[in-house]
């Protein structure tokens, strides 16, 4: 196998990232991975402000690229290609990344490779754990929630996904409803540890519907309603109420993800994979309760469970560089007419 070294760029949401990944005979190695979070920039607004994000990406991309090359101990001359997230995502940020990548390619003659952000997440288990196709992957983040069977670098079957909010988004909204810090996931998880998940009855949306689709916005509304009922009753929430609501909400999300994973696994196993694997990707995979439940579901079905390290579950450019390597090996090359795509289903 020829050694391939690719610089990856990511700017589709609120992280500006650049990374260098090299793949040779011994597998893939992350030579550097820089992530510049915009959390501070958006925290006052309670969500990502697209225009602010785009400007910050445009400002920070070159710095991230220079740092990634420096950390890898390489120069542009050592690269085989530049891979960039071309969508889906917030269009201004994606355009900033695509323009930066085009600039580097125009100046150096390096090939340009467009990467789908979702493919980047979905292929991460191959980067971290050398997982072979076909495997089942659950993307659970602030922006995405879907079950995919990965058949190949450019071949995915979508088994189902959220019909409204992503689970991370629901965690963030629940945190806001209860006056907890952003991002909500870690804050709600910490509160939930002190709470009783059975204290408040919360719904398990869409469990009565066949298939792998999910829904989380009703659950968030149920938390809001419960909060208001308690407030009417007692004039406010006690610390214990808040912890119980967090625990109940987290358990409801967990139960829904676990049951839908069982169904997705059953569909995946009809493909008779030689070494069955279910992987997770996305920031919500950081949640200990959710992770443990998914692990248990996999164990019941005798399917290996793969969860990449957290830094590679959340948005990063190593997954983009790695996906770029796979596409490069398949002969994919994009031109200077490459367009940023806000919507780009796998
Ligand atoms: O993958 P990610 O960094 O960004 C995208 O959405 O693409 O995921 C961020 C999301 C946020 O909504 C955050 O609240 C959630 O992942 N998250 C968690 C936890 N840590 C992060 N959700 C639940 N439990 C956690 N421990
Ligand atoms: Zn993402």
Image (cartoon, rainbow, N blue to C red):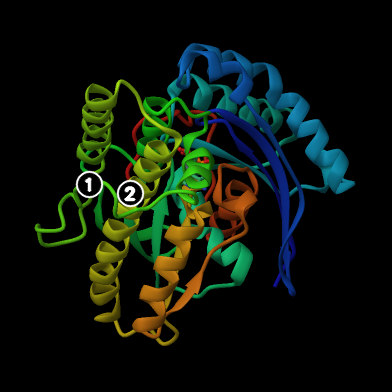
Q: Is residue 62 above or below residue 239?
A: above
| Disc on the earlier residue, 1 or 2 | 1
Q: Does the closest atom of ligand 1 sit within 8 Å of the Cβ of label 2?
A: no
Q: Is residue 322 above or below residue 149?
A: above
User: To which residue does mark 2 refer?
Assistant: 248
Task: Answer with the quarter of the image where residue 259 lies.
Answer: bottom left
Q: Is residue 336 left or right of residue 176?
A: right
Task: Answer with the quarter of the image where residue 10 lies.
Answer: top right
User: To which residue does mark 1 refer?
Assistant: 202
Q: CA distance from mark 1 to mark 2?
A: 7 Å
Few, some or many residues within 10 Å of mark 1 (<14, 14–19, 20+): many
- Name the secondary structure under disc 1: loop
Residue at 31 percent of width and 85 percent of height? 272
Q: Is residue 297 above or below residue 180?
A: below
Q: Residue 101 location, x and y as percent?
A: 63, 31
In this orientation, does residue 157 appear? no
Q: Residue 288 location, x and y as percent?
A: 51, 58
Q: Residue 35 location, x and y as percent?
A: 68, 37
Residue at 40 percent of width and 32 percent of height? 238
The quadrant of the image that shows the N terminus is bottom right
């Amino acid at each position: 196998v020829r050694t391939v070294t690719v610089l990856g760029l990511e700017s589709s949401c609120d992280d500006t990232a650049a990374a260098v990944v090299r793949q040779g005979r011994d597998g893939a190695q992350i030579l550097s991975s820089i992530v510049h979070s915009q959390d501070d920039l958006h925290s006052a607004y309670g969500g990502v402000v697209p225009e602010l994000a785009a400007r910050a990406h445009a400002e920070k991309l070159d710095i991230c690229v220079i740092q990634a090359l420096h950390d890898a101990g390489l120069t542009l001359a050592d690269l085989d290609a530049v891979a960039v997230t071309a969508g889906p995502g917030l269009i201004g940020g994606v355009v900033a990344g695509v323009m930066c990548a085009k600039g580097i390619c125009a100046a150096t003659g390096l090939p340009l490779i467009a990467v789908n952000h979702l493919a980047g997440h979905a292929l991460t288990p191959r980067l971290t754990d050398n997982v072979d196709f076909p495997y089942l992957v659950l993307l659970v983040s602030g922006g995405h929630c879907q079950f995919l069977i990965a058949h190949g670098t450019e071949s995915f079957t979508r088994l189902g996904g959220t019909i409204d909010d992503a689970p991370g988004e629901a965690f963030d909204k629940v945190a806001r409803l209860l006056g907890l810090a952003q991002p909500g996931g870690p804050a709600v998880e910490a509160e939930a540890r002190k709470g009783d998940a059975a204290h408040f009855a919360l719904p398990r949306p869409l469990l009565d519907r066949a298939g792998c689709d999910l829904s989380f916005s009703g659950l968030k509304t149920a938390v809001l309603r419960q909060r208001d009922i308690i407030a009417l009753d007692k004039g406010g929430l006690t610390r214990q109420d808040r912890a119980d609501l967090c625990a109940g909400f987290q358990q409801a999300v967990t139960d829904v993800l676990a049951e839908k994973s069982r169904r997705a696994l059953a569909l995946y196993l009809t493909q008779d994979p030689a070494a069955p694997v279910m992987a997770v990707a996305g920031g919500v995979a950081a949640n200990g309760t959710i992770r443990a439940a998914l692990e248990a579901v996999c164990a019941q079905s005798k399917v290996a469970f793969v969860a990449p390290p957290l830094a590679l579950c959340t948005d990063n450019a190593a997954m983009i560089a790695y996906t770029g390597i796979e596409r490069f090996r398949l002969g994919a090359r994009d031109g200077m007419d490459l367009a940023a795509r806000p919507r780009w289903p796998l």
